[in-house]
Amino acid sequence: MAKPQKRYVCQACGSVASRWQGQCADCSEWNTLVEEASAVVTPFAAKHNLHGGGRSIVLTSLDAEVTLPERMATGIAEFDRALGGGFVEGSATLIGGDPGIGKSTLLLQAAARMALAGHSVAYVSGEEAADQVRLRARRLGLGNAPVQLAAASSTRDILTTLSTGAPPALLVIDSIQTMHSDLIEGAPGTVSQVRASAQELIRFAKERGTALVLVGHVTKDGTIAGPRVLEHMVDTVLAFEGERSHQYRILRAIKNRFGGTDEIGVFSMQSEGLAEVANPSALFLTHREEGVTGATVFPALEGTRPVLVEIQALVVRLASGATPRRAVVGWDSGRLAMILAVLEARCGLSFSTAEVYLNIAGGYRVQDPAADLAVAAALVSALSERPVPSESVAFGEVALSGELRPVAHGPLRLKEAGKLGFERALVPIAVAKDGKGEGAMQLTGFRTLGQFVDHMLGRG
Ligand code: TYD
Ligand code: MG
């Protein structure tokens, strides 16, 4: 009988080492290695790779009949959109997000809606007492929804309870970091505990056809706390994002075995819970004033959904030779540096003695490279103190050469801008050529950023 071997698992990245080390060799975090017992493998079986006694599995062809999994709509259209139509029976979904962003609120609302629609729903909170959840449900006007509620954190207790009688159609676990499995040692929240608890719950979900939802907190660096492993274990990973100081929230699919990952759901946090935002552009483009410098409207694309956002820039000339600040909220600071460099090197504008601030209004986070031209427009407008032509939007990618590149889904962006009353679009020349004759938008195309700057400054 071989002695169980000791192994050490990094609590940050989940990598395994055979000896304890102060620093993880994979992710370089300090003091994250924790001892964990590993399975017993006899040297003989390991050496000869013997796995006798297995059952034979059925091999089938790729073109065999497909049975699509049953979906249960939550009844919250924005949630269903992010899920690709609803929760799938026997699947596991992980919803990650910063503490306080509204995960519990969203899931309580979805659980209540589904319970009211006749599904059996169990909501297990390991973070809050049952009364707290009840009070919240009452505040949300959902106090009478037939949700089965429990405050518990032992996976064995939860699964023993749910195994008697019919399994629930939906099981919400809030949060996986508070769950504890007695199959393995360690405190709740450690990688091994999170993994073991999730494994037990997922096995139950698959066996009993329950749609399982795990809430997961996110760490500072944006990964779901502790283990990346959790993301591999579940079928769907959703991220609930937003700035706590702003009211809007975005539910984004990061992984989805049963649907696309490019759809988002948009919500706004109100005193009576999360409200759906069917028209996000209206949310991000609140009162716009005419003639303001340093602001451009950018038609961003979230999956197949256009969202108009306002990009704001402020340029402050410095008298002294101090190193000027560059601060960005809602966009990539590396990309801002690149746009500034292209404006300096290719367009003859100087930002080197000025502080530059860039902000995406409403706390929105832009990831779309098509924002380059809109950012450049806001910067040039702020520097020159000339407003961007009113009723116009701008989009396009800027190359280091200064050339403007067309971007995906130009027509969709133009259509959304037209719908919201914009009349002009400043775009790369290729987009202007393609889009001629589409709708009432007047398109002005530019080949290079230099041409665009000349146009903005009235130089040509
Ligand atoms: P919560 O769902 O508890 O966040 P999480 O589970 O992600 O930690 O939401 C907490 C925040 O939401 C809290 O700061 C209060 C706010 N909130 C509202 O603004 N309106 C509401 O109706 C509710 C329930 C919460
Ligand atoms: Mg919570």
Image: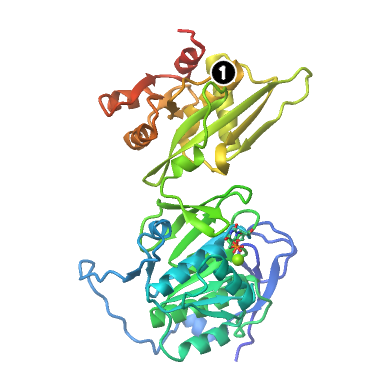
Q: Quadrant of the C terminus?
A: top left
Task: Indicate whether 202 appears above or below 263.
Answer: below
Residue at 57% from the left image edge and 82% from the top image edge: 155
Disc 1: which residue: 345
Going by the picture, which residue comes out furthest to the top? 460
Scheme of colours in the image: rainbow
Mark 1 nearby-residue class (10 Å; few <14, some 14–19, many ≥20): some
Q: Is residue 112 visible?
A: yes
Q: Is residue 142 left or right of residue 278?
A: right
Task: Indicate whether 378 appears above or below 163.
Answer: above
Splitting the image into 4 quarters, where does residue 228 fall?
bottom right
Splitting the image into 4 quarters, where does residue 149 fall?
bottom right
Residue at 62% from the left image edge and 64% from the top image edge: 226
Task: Indicate whether 333 appears above or below 69.
Answer: above
Q: Secondary structure at mark 1?
A: helix
Task: Indicate the position of residue 310 as horizontal and vertical percent values.
Answer: 51, 34
Choose between 361 and 6: the one closer to the eye: 361
Splitting the image into 4 quarters, where does residue 315 fall?
top right
Disc 1 marks a residue whose amino acid type is: Ala
Choose between 184 and 61: the one closer to the eye: 184
Is ligand 1 closer than 8 angstroms to the Cβ of mark 1?
no
Q: Quadrant of the N terminus?
A: bottom right
Q: Is residue 186 left or right of residue 172?
A: right
Q: How many marks?
A: 1
Residue at 39% from the left image edge and 33% from the top image edge: 417
Choose between 160 and 335: the one closer to the eye: 160
Ligand 2 located in image quadrant: bottom right
Residue at 32% from the left image edge and 84% from the top image edge: 56
Task: Indicate the position of residue 63 as horizontal and vertical percent values.
Answer: 20, 66
Q: Is residue 331 visible?
A: no
Task: Indicate the position of residue 167 as horizontal and vertical percent values.
Answer: 42, 84
Task: Indicate the position of residue 302 as horizontal and vertical percent values.
Answer: 42, 45
